[in-house]
Image: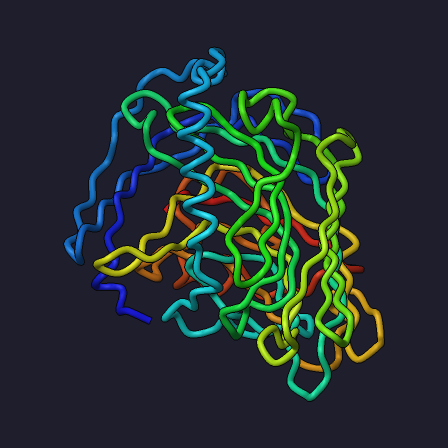
Amino acid sequence: MKPFSEIRFLLVRAMHRSSNAHFFEPSRPSKGKMRLVGVVAVVLGIAVAGVLVPGPVRAGAPDSAQPDASTVARARAAFLKYMSSHRPMVRSRLAPLAAGGGATSLPSYNWSGYADSEDSSKTVSSVSGQWVIPYVECPSGPYLYQDTFIAQWVGIDGFTNGTVEQLGTATECFEGVSYYYVWYEMFPAGTVEEGTVACINNNVDCPQPGDRITASVTVTPGGNYTLSLTDITRPQESFSVTASCAPSTCVDSSAEWIVERPAFDLPFGFQILPLVDFFQTGFSNGTLTSGGKTTDIEGFRDGTVYDMAMIDDSDSYFLDCVGQTGFGRPSLLQTSDPNACPTVASFKGSFAVTWDSSF
């Protein structure tokens, strides 16, 4: 892994209103909660910080116009580029937080959620989970063209190795418009977008905020995988695919329930996309099968249960937090505060993830 001094970021943060849905309440809340934010730019290790004077926010303005076919094609190409080249979990340099609830802390720059990692010769043969696609707030005003992103998925592998067998949903803010995707990735191929032709070509008839999703990955001892996603709200977005990977290559050593901002390689290092403001999302009924025994996330006993919070590249503050209490904090959630984002276990395979900052 290249040192973070070689990572180039263009990071933008602006004051805005939240228009997102609570994980357990998928209806859109009223606009009115303000977030205090700043701006940080790190270019080849040179940091500049400042405070922005916010302008007026027009609710829904960027999304009010339907993009033309060429813009949809560019957005889709960017999505596939980001996701097809995304790296597995990138560990933070920050020391792990204190363990709690039977879970071990492992801060990450690009993942948050949980990973159950095998410590023995046993392997994971299935993983599943459910979630609600969250509402997002795209950048506006002078930051309209700053891409922001969230991918939400379940999968096998990628926590301790470079293979991934995963599927889920994603939201991309591209030129001020939100695009919603369903997708899968099966090593060694790149990300494949699924869904209706109208969604893929014209950004209509797509998954939407509030859609209830269930997804699973199963694998046989011979390395035959089935990846299935059901959009309960919009069944036309559902899909199921089969693929194979030799057990010597795809070793099935971990199960994950993840919120991700893609990190991808560039000639000078790698870049991590800003995390879109999603207010709160999460997973429910997260289960895995390890060594023939099916448990919920926290019931895993064949290895370690990792609680991952996503933090910024300077290791100074949280971008999101698993199990966070309270919303709309007036300042950044500092990693130096041991009580800011304590390590917690999921409850019956369910947990919430709260957004705090984009980068």
Residue furthest to the top: 65
- In front: 141, or 330? 141
State whether residue 230 is above or below residue 242.
above
Between 111 and 203, the one nearer to me in the picture: 203
Left or right for 296, reference 113: right
Residue in view at x 59 percent, y 58 percent = 186
> Which x, y percent locates residue 59?
48, 15
Q: Residue drawn at (64%, 74%), measured in percent from left and top?
A: 246
Residue in view at x 48 percent, y 63 percent = 88
Given residues 75 and 172, the one toward you in this image is 75
Position of residue 294 in the picture relative to residue 195 (left or right): right
Q: Residue at x 58, y 76 (%)?
A: 249
Q: x%, y% of residue 50?
A: 20, 39
In this rendering, the answer to whether 128 lies above or below 207 is below
Q: Check the image and report above or below for 60 versus 256.
A: above
- Residue 299: image location, x then y, percent: 78, 71
Q: Is residue 99 above or below residue 138?
A: below
